[in-house]
Image (tube, rainbow, N blue to C red):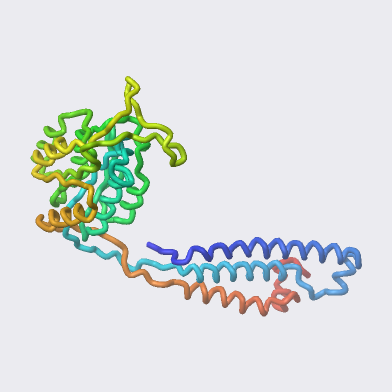
Amino acid sequence: MYLLEEKIWFWLLLAIPVIILLFLGVLFWQRAAQKRFADSTLLKKLSPERSLFKPALKIFVISLAIFFLVIALVNPKMGTKLETVKREGVDLVFAIDVSKSMLAEDIAPNRMEKSKQLVTQIINNLGSDRIGIIAYAGSAYPQLPITTDYSSAKLFLSQMNTDMLSSQGTAIREAIELAKTYYNDEEQTNRVLFIISDGEDHVGESSNIAEQANQEGIRIFTIGVGETTGGPIPLKRNGIVQSYKKDQNGETVITKLDEQTLKDIASEANGEYIYGKNTDEVTEKVKEVLNGMNKKEFEAKQFADFKDQFQWFLGAGLLLLFLDIFLLDRKTGWLKKLNLFNEN
């Protein structure tokens, strides 16, 4: 396992082809000037000790030295051992509603962005729990499998939007079914599913599947996002509202938070319904729930003890620059005797 600490220094490698091009340009200019001065036979007699190989060798050595010095600046690090870190926690899966109704702005900035804020804050307050993310609308889609990498989780979370899934609706049942596949049977940690939604379940039978999930050891907590009074679904272009979604009769669609559906799902799965308007209150409630659960031990392996390796490349680069001082344009005596490059 290796790590490149300062990758920006790789840009200095562009100096190598520039140096080579300048060398070739000077070489062609010299040959053209020499031809104007005298023919090749006469030039060999005038400068019998001049090496044709050394200039090319010098430019190669300089280029290689620059390469090693740049790698030294990048500061590569090597992982010296594989450390096993024991963790205790809960397996959490977040099923986030990405249907078009989540664009309603009855809760600021809108239901979709509020859901992402809630999950982000929950993740920020976690300890060593493992997390997974599911996106669902008319169908469910695995966004991120169970992991301890919170940074990746927040990255995937930030990219979620209501255009992710082409099939519209709110199929909570499918989200629960998919969540059941997230948990590892071989590592029996406590299993928790958070459903973040406005509760408009257009498919139905969510309570039945929630009860089945609870029988498999999954507790379901639902977080309601929106207002019971509801709001229209804006249709925007370049961030500007053009109109609002309408039904078949041309009437503006009003989408409302269906708390009862979310309460029923949580009740059937030994969980609890949480109103998601206040982010701090939701975060504290989730923390309270998780602290009250028994933590199970699981293991996560990671590379540890990265050590700097720049000194090797720095030494090689300086050595090559030192050698370049002794690479004169004249032929070397013992190499001349060997005639390795047919220069006699």
Q: Quadrant of the C terminus?
A: bottom right
Q: Is residue 179 left or right of residue 329?
A: left
Q: Is residue 101 left or right of residue 285?
A: right
Q: Nearer the viewer, residue 285 or 109?
A: 109
**How far from the left and from the top, in percent, is residue 321?**
61, 76
Quarter location, residue 163 = top left
The correct choice, above or below, for 308 with respect to 153 in the image is below
Work out which residue is located at the far top of the displayed protein and give it. 249
Q: Quadrant of the N terminus?
A: bottom left
**How far from the left and from the top, in percent, is residue 208?**
11, 32
Whether residue 237 is visible, yes or no, is yes
> How many marks overall?
0
**How far from the left and from the top, in percent, is residue 332?**
72, 77
Q: At x 25% / y 33%, what residue is drawn?
A: 170
Q: Is residue 26 left or right of residue 307?
A: right
Q: Nearer the viewer, residue 254 or 116?
A: 254
Whether residue 177 is visible, yes or no, is no
Q: At x 17% / y 43%, what residue is drawn?
A: 222
Q: At x 31% / y 46%, what residue is drawn?
A: 108
Q: Is residue 66 left or right of residue 40?
A: left
**How far from the left and from the top, in percent, is residue 51?**
76, 71
Q: Nearer the viewer, residue 257 or 36?
A: 257
Quarter location, residue 4 = bottom left
